[in-house]
Amino acid sequence: MPAMSVRDDETGRPRLTLVEGGRAGDARDEDALLGAWLVGDDEAFGELVRRHQPLVLAIVRRYAATAEDARDLAQRTFLKAFESARRALARSGRDAVPFKRWLVRVAVNLAKNHRRDAGRWTSVAVDPERLSSGATPALEALEKAQATARVRRAVLDLPRRQREVLTLRLDAELPFAEIGATLGITENAAKVSFHLAARRLRAELGQEGR
Amino acid sequence: MSACADYLPLLSDQAAGEGSPADQARLADHLQGCAACRAEAEALATVLSLAALPPPGEAERAALTGLAESVRMEQRRTALGLRPPLRYAAALLGVAAAVAFLVAPAFTRRGPTIPSPELAMAESADWVAPDTDELLAASDLAADDGATAALSGADELALAALLAD
């Protein structure tokens, strides 16, 4: 059961909410689309890309320096995932790993290898109007921007497994069961990794406040 | 004051937006009477909201325009190129050529040949001295009759003195 991010009306902060269904749509549809693609159906291919491109973008954008960079990563992800899926389907047929799982695995690996710099999300712009509108909001805005940059940098510095679980949860909004299946660990292990990652980030934020 | 260790996993689940209804209800009961866990829940929510990225902007969404088509074109371009078995064959051919380039000189290079003493003796036994007249006739020197005629008078005198000595 995938989750979906919405904004909290009171605090304005994003919060995670569970919703039925999911981004990737029905798995049987996906099998049919993959089958059609394998026999040369361009429409099915296009539908698979369009269906999954928000998910792929959500995973890779944290590691991309620009929007074009993110597109390049997304394109490479699809190319590699289609190639892997074709080989897996030829080898294992119906028992092959679902296409979405290939995509997520490939996107996570490519994004990890792509991390040449800290990424554009480790610096946070501060609204100049807020800075000039009064001492307290300006200070708050600056402090929040600094804290945000620090926490996002700390996300990239998390141990690999913790980072993968945390970002697949926060960015891709995958449920822990799906994260576990994708990374080859149990749902419980995924929850533990998320817990450890959150605690580590919390400690990072606590250090900044001192 | 730190949060209750037993409730930390439930606090993480809540921050992640997961957890069974029973667990959520148990945590809610606990939070009513535990200030430390309430503070921890608030801190986790804060740090995760800071870690979360803003939704994709217009530029990011626009950059994905036509992605399906470009992926398909790239796939076709790759498919039109060498297929994997041919790629391996081409790579092997390249390696073989490189090895041949490195090894071939060892088989083709020849140093100066030094005849054995026995062969040199046999060849010298058959040697016949050339006729110097024939050699002179065949050379350009014999044809250069005017060479001495071009000498000046002083040169002739110097030559005569030299011959007299």
Image: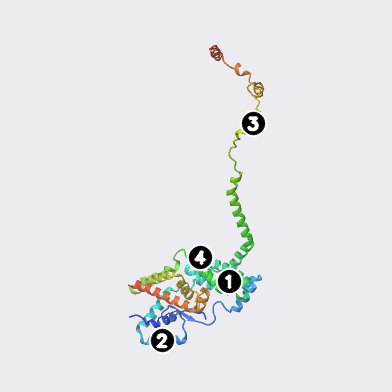
Question: In the image, what residue occupies the spot 43% across and 87% down?
Answer: B25
Cα–Cα gap, marks 2 and 4: 43 Å
Q: Which residue is mark 4?
A: A69
Q: Does B117 appear above or below A175?
A: above
Q: Amino acid at mark 1?
A: Val
Position of the C terminus of chain A, as image quadrant, is bottom left
Cα–Cα gap, marks 1 and 4: 18 Å
**Position of residue A29 measured from the top left corner of the image (x, y, whole percent):** 61, 78
Q: Secondary structure at mark 3?
A: helix
Q: Which residue is mark 1?
A: A49
Q: Mark 2 vs mark 3: give the one in front.
A: 3
Q: Residue lying furthest top in this view?
A: B164
Q: Does B105 appear above or below B122?
A: below
How packed is label 1: few (under 14 Cα within 10 Å), some, or many (20 or more)? many
On the same chain, marks 2 and 1? The answer is no
> In this rendering, does residue A133 appear at all?
no
> In this rendering, does residue A31 appear at all?
yes
Specify the label residue B28 is tagged with: 2
Q: Amino acid at mark 2?
A: Ala
When asked about the image quadrant of residue A52, the answer is bottom right
On the same chain, marks 3 and 1? The answer is no
